[in-house]
Image: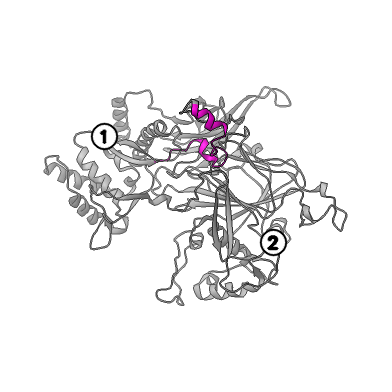
Amino acid sequence: MLDSNRRASGLSSVGDLGTYTSDTMLKEIDSLNKASNDEGLSLDQVQSILKSHLPMSLIDPQHLCLLHQYTLNKSSGRSIRGTTKVYDRPHVSTFYRSKYASPKNSLAILQQVEPNYQIPPASLTFTGYAAKFINLSLNAVNLYWDGGRIPSGPRAGEMHKVLVGTIPSMESIGTSSFPGHTFYVTPTYDKDHILQRWSITEDEPVLYHDPLADMSAEAQREEMERLTSEGKWTEKQRFGREAWMVDRSFGRDYLVKTGSVWLANFPQPYLHFNGDNASVDEEGSSLPLVDDEVEAVQHGHRMHMWQADYIGQTHRVDTPSLYYNTLPERLERLTKNDYSPKFEEKRLLEMRQFQSSSVKEKKTDSNNATMPITLKVLSCAPRVLETKKFLSPVEVQHLIDLASGAKGDVAMERSTVLASNAKGNEPSKQVRGSKADARSSTGGWIHREQDTVVDTIFRRVADLLNIDEHLMRDQVQDYSDTKEGEKWLPTHDRIVEAMQLIRYVPGEGYAAHHDFTYPSIENRYQPKRYATVLLYLTGEGDVVEEGVRRSASSGKSGSNGIQQDDGLQGGQTTFPRAITTDFHDGVKVEPESGKAILFYNVLPDGNMDDLSQHSGGKVEKGVKYLANIWVWDPIVN
């Protein structure tokens, strides 16, 4: 972790806090500041103003600190300088604890001759990366990918263009790209009027549509004043532009310090402070003094992340959510009351008769039994971990039944591609037709409340992530049967999306893509899909006929004469940009029934991890069933 200087000037220093920093509050601060001969207000004075305008729940240390700096620097016009923690990715040679540990290996021998020598990473055949487009104009624009002229066929000579999505004013959108790809923006009402065109490069994948870009800084300010006075530019848009300018400045510093592109929005969610040096006022709000040395952690990046220091590293966590080895005769949809402490405890105890800590034995364990989950690091950059036998065969078959229509009400529809912008990360808002050839499959959505088996899988996923399973629930009203002092942690919103079940048939797959999305610059929480959990329901050689899975290990042929050669072939999950010393095509994960892989879409500093790009290989034979669960931090957008 390295320190990086960041700059902000004037009101821009308030960053995302400006969404609830009122004009009245700033006028009061400016008035008191003038009375102090522009020497700045004390921390107590700023805190007093905040208390008179905001409830204590909205006052946090970062808000207080930024406003205090604002009073100290506004009159002089000086930049506000501070420090933040950024992630410095380790060198690839550290990813192999045993491979390069021996004094007899080639690296150690080379280092005897050249002490600073480090083995280089393998060059990658895949050249894709994330691209982000920001609209700084007053009106929404459409973003298109330009594929050039179609060389042959019925549409030969026509332009091959694909709508990526609509970018609202002062917002962003993202997609995957390759060097030399061309994009352009148009007004939403005229797709033939090109406002700006880019030929994208890996060195500059964050691009701005800014009608004021050719003006000097002074001319830009004058134009903004004019547009604001004429009512053509709202204060909200003006704040958005200033926020993006701060983000752009920070991105330059971040690139210099880390060598990575800044894809998230600056600033990140508020900091909360841990340590004994923070002062606590009479209402219990922790407000550290400016000169205090306190340990700060990102409030918006509070979820646990497993370490991935070297390939083969293992972690273990115990879970009370045991395997289902038989199913109850009746499986009903869970209601709000089923999650109340009184009824939930009773339900979980009743389900123990169908569960076991062994995937093979249909035995009943004690009520307080647990089973281990062991995670193994497959890749350090990006962070990818796997755990085998995460699901029992009974649970696998239950999910396949739901996906195949044999049970319940899960509607499987043609999969679509999501445009990564502030407005489009819900299943119902996926952009149909956007680069549709990138994905071919059928999918459906299963909520945690589908039945008690699915609920147990969600609980086990929470343990896999080492987070509280209560965070995966919707807001719950207080229950009359909740005992005083009993641990009950309802959240105002769940941090997990519904489980997506996907079915791939021969010829279908999913081109390399990212799971993260870009939040609105105005969103104070800056929510992100921080982790993805993939659950493999079929493995190599598995056969699914009439909705029933038969594993490759069950024999050459089944009772109905199905040959193993008819089973699943292909369908590997590939991380084509994984950094290794050996593999030019990244890291591949073979499908295996019951296996789960966990990978993180963000870095420890909150930036998007561009290396988390992944693909689903085309199925050559058989049918591939997969389930994925997307987990957000700190809330679902």
The residue where tag 2 is placed is: 398
Marks 1 and 2, how far apart at CA: 59 Å
| Residue 251 position within the rendered picture, expressed as x and y whole percent measured from the top left | 40, 34
Discs 1, 2 touching: Cβ within 8 Å? no
Is 294 drawn above or below residue 574 in the view shown? below
Is residue 62 among what the camera can see? Answer: yes
Which residues make up the magenta segment? 86-112
On the rendered structure, is 116 left or right of 344?
left
| Magenta-drawn stretch contains 378 | no
**Quadrant including the N terminus:** top left
Q: Label 1's element?
A: loop
Q: Label 2's element?
A: helix
| Magenta-drawn stretch contains 111 | yes
The residue where tag 1 is placed is: 79
Query: What type is the residue that disc 1 sits on?
Result: Ser
| Residue 417 position within the rendered picture, expressed as x and y whole percent measured from the top left | 60, 42
Judging depth in this view, the residue of 445 and 275 nearest the camera is 275
Query: What type is the residue that disc 2 sits on?
Result: His
